[in-house]
Image (tube, coloured by chain):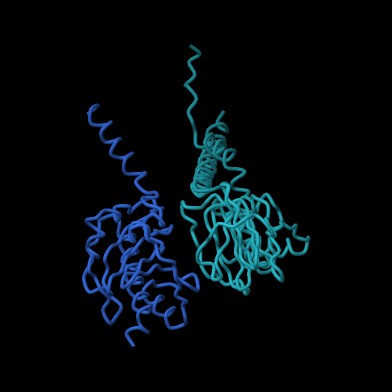
Amino acid sequence: MTGRKPKKFTAFLWHRRIGLLAIILVIILSITGIMLNHTESLKLDEKYVDSSLLLSWYGLQPSGEAVSYDVGDHVITVLDNLIFFNSYPVGKSEQTFHGAVKTEQLIALAFDTEIVLLTSDGELVERMPTGHSFSDIQRIGIKYQRPVIETSGPLYYVADEHILDWDAVTAENITWAKKITLGETKLKVLLESFRGRGLTQERVVLDLHSGRIFGEYGVYVMDAAAIALLWLSCSGLWVWWSRRRKLRKKRHFQKHHRKQH
Amino acid sequence: MKHVLPFIFLIYVSTINAGGVYQEPDAFIAEVFNDNVPKPGVIWLDKDIKAQLKDILGHNYKGLRVRYWQQDDRTAWILDEIGKDKPITTGIVINQGRIERVRILVFRESRGWEVRHSFFTEQFDDATLKQNRELDRGIDNISGATLSVRAVTRLARVALLLDQQLNKPRAG
């Protein structure tokens, strides 16, 4: 036993610990706070994010590849389940895309168990589920200006004039839909359309400031950082006040007691 | 308690995956017409019909035409409408302007599958459309399946409206 009292967890000790713990979050809060105060002068709402990492984080970067088919004057593309007529989104399908052809009046798109019909202006006409009688579409082609379907079964099916019903057909004189690769410019326009208006820098800074960029619990982390800041203010005041009191006591002691010796 | 927990778990498991394909649409059509399925027809939606559909659905109908099957005075329709997030595929048979049968064919939502039961679908039997495009009767709600109940009710009204449109020329 040394006779010394065990060391207490003083306000200063906690001030230091919490300060060290919250340092990164407080830096983020401070910098993003300043940036948000000057959004207009920094033009954060006019600048768009290019980083593919950030775009992926926000779900704005497609995870799959664009699958495109030429249908005369237009191109049909499916990208991450979104159907595009040229660069305009016209619908969604969670099934695999097997091609598109231009028929006499309409454009027919083939998915696993569904045919989607569009007008030549890209307007949706009808979604036709194939049902169990013929499904599992492999590819789509054209014969006598009518769509023809190849399934995993041995038969091929051709649509009637108005694409209402299907009949078995021989596999002769069918021109199958051919996949194309989009040029750089067309792909860029398509990606812009996929992302909508895009992601502004203001959105990212705002989400960093609120913690939402880190997901559901990020907000609570930033709440903790704000509480830590509150604690640091109070404990800092307490440390300053207690030190000042000790200093006063010391000066008082030196002034009134030591001089007597 | 230890005997009750597995029971509760079984009830829970049996309810969470109650959705799915109850009947393939073409099997429904085959059943309706006793395997003597007529060739399908389509009704093209002009501005006027689209406006009426929007009034019923509360949103624009996606598509320019609707497929149907008809034999004498009976028409059968396969229609989709979103309950909460995903479409509910419903088969509806109309006979002389009155609903003969409503059947839920594919249910893709995680909740509200109770609308598939006959105690719910039988409420539509013999229902017809009033002047204001409402059903001539009230449809009881199912607790916890309100959105699905509303979606199926809207589809019943849509089918009746389309059947009326189809028979308009003949009536005139």
Q: Measured from the top left, where is residue A156 in percent x and y?
A: 59, 54
Where does the C terminus of chain A fall, quadrant-wise?
top right
Q: Measured from the top left, where is residue B15 in percent x and y?
A: 31, 44
Vertical side of A184 occupied by B21: above or below: above
Total marks in image: 0
Q: What colour is chain A?
A: cyan
Q: Which chain is blue?
A: B
Residue B31 placement, left or right of A113: left
Residue at the bottom extreme of this rendering = B172
Asked which quadrant contains residue B96, the reply is bottom left
Residue A227 seen: no
Residue at screen point 38% across, 66% down: B77
Q: Measured from the top left, where is residue A254 in percent x and y?
A: 57, 35
Residue at screen point 35% across, 69% down: B71
Residue at the right extreme of this rendering = A184
Residue B60 placement, left or right of A204: left
Vertical side of B130 occupied by B116: above or below: above
Residue A157 seen: yes
Residue at screen point 25% across, 33% down: B7
Considering depth in this image, is A41 or A96 the residue closer to the camera?
A: A96
Considering depth in this image, is B133 or A259 the residue closer to the camera?
A: B133
Considering depth in this image, is A175 or B24 the residue closer to the camera?
A: A175
Q: Measured from the top left, where is residue A18 in percent x and y?
A: 54, 39
Asked which quadrant contains residue B164, the reply is bottom left
Residue A158 placement, left or right of A183: left
Considering depth in this image, is A114 or A48 the residue closer to the camera?
A: A114
Vertical side of A116 occupied by A211: above or below: above
